[in-house]
Amino acid sequence: MAREHVEFIQSQVLDWQSWPHLKGIEYKELSTDKETGATTGLFKFPEGWKEKQAYWMESEEEFFVVEGDIEINDVHYSEGCFGYLPARYLRRTVRANKDTTIIRFLDQNPAPTYYNYGDPLPEVGKAPVESLNTYEMVWDKGVLDPKLLHLDFGRKILRIDPETKSKTFLYMVSPQVRPESWSGPREHHPTVEESFTLYGTLAGDRGVMRTGSYFWRPPGIPHGPYGSRTGCVLLIRFVGGAHVNHWSEKMYPFSFDAPYRPILPKHLRGKGLKEWKPTPF
């Protein structure tokens, strides 16, 4: 996998640029695999934008609506909605009903193949997830790992891939939580972990992630412990296999004010090495 470690960057410091595959769309590139063209990014659709010709992609796509309302094949995706469109899923119509921002996860080169009516329909191998409204879901507060008990967390499972067991879910951390005695173990996973902070803050060993922060962490990288002053909601993906937590025996100190120590590819260091903080009152 030729995607470089990004941990972490605030998307606010990145510039909007034109998306090369569909006209009229801007995006912020968060991470890209140089070999496959797989990419994660924030995408901005202006109100009234419409793709006039049907198309499909070889890439699978997961996405989450941060704000606005977008319509795909007459299915509405409003703020808080999640979608999964498998490879070769035909997008007959796509339009933005409001100014809309979504985060998209594309697992191959996302160049569109345009479809002319009368041509054979592309074959789709997996079932789509169309407009799953996460506001209508209930937080699962069952604790599966006691080492995370201090976070008082909840989950909303959005999708588990039937073949790879990759998992996408919302993860909620309560406010004013920290590890007992201000220290805890670190964890690592046998798969990639990818995360975008939808709301709030989460403090960890590389600093304080705020609304809009993003990381792509390769397998086997130790991280933590974590806590939060404000609480937060994260959109998390475990990519390429089942989610498993492996814990250290050693304990590490925790601070709500850990210094920002990012790991960034060379092309992001010019913008991402300085800690971003929101404007104060």
Image (tube, rainbow, N blue to C red):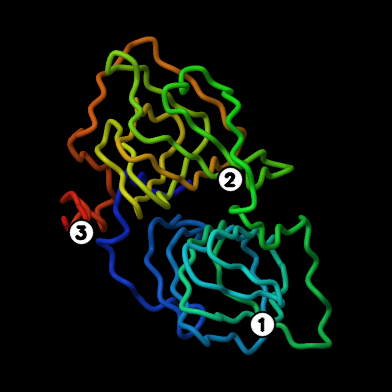
Front-most of residues 222 and 206:
206
**29 relative to 277, above or below:** below
For disc 2, the marked residue is 168
Element carrying mark 1: strand
Residue 248, image x, y percentages: 40, 15
| C-alpha distance separating marks 2 and 3 | 28 Å
Residue 45 in the image, given as x and y percentages of width and height: 47, 78
In the rendered image, the vertical position of residue 9 relative to residue 140, given as above or below: below
Q: Earlier in the sequence, mark 1 or mark 2?
A: 1
Foreground of the two, 23 or 114: 23
Callout 3: 10 Å neighbours few (<14), some, many (20+)? some
> Foreground: 8 or 47?
47
> Which amino acid, mark 3?
Lys
Q: Which residue is tagged 3? A: 271
Q: Is residue 22 left or right of residue 161?
A: left
| Residue at image location 59% in from the left, 85% down from the top | 51
Numbered disc in front, either 1 or 2:
2
Q: Residues within 10 Å of mark 2 (few under 14, many from 20)?
A: many
Residue drawn at (43%, 38%), measured in percent from left and top? 218
- Tell me, for residue 114, which label it has, or none: 1
Q: Is residue 270 above or below residue 171?
A: below
Report the amino acid beneath label 2: Thr
Residue 190: x and y in percent read: 52, 29
Spatial CA distance of label 1 from label 2 is 29 Å
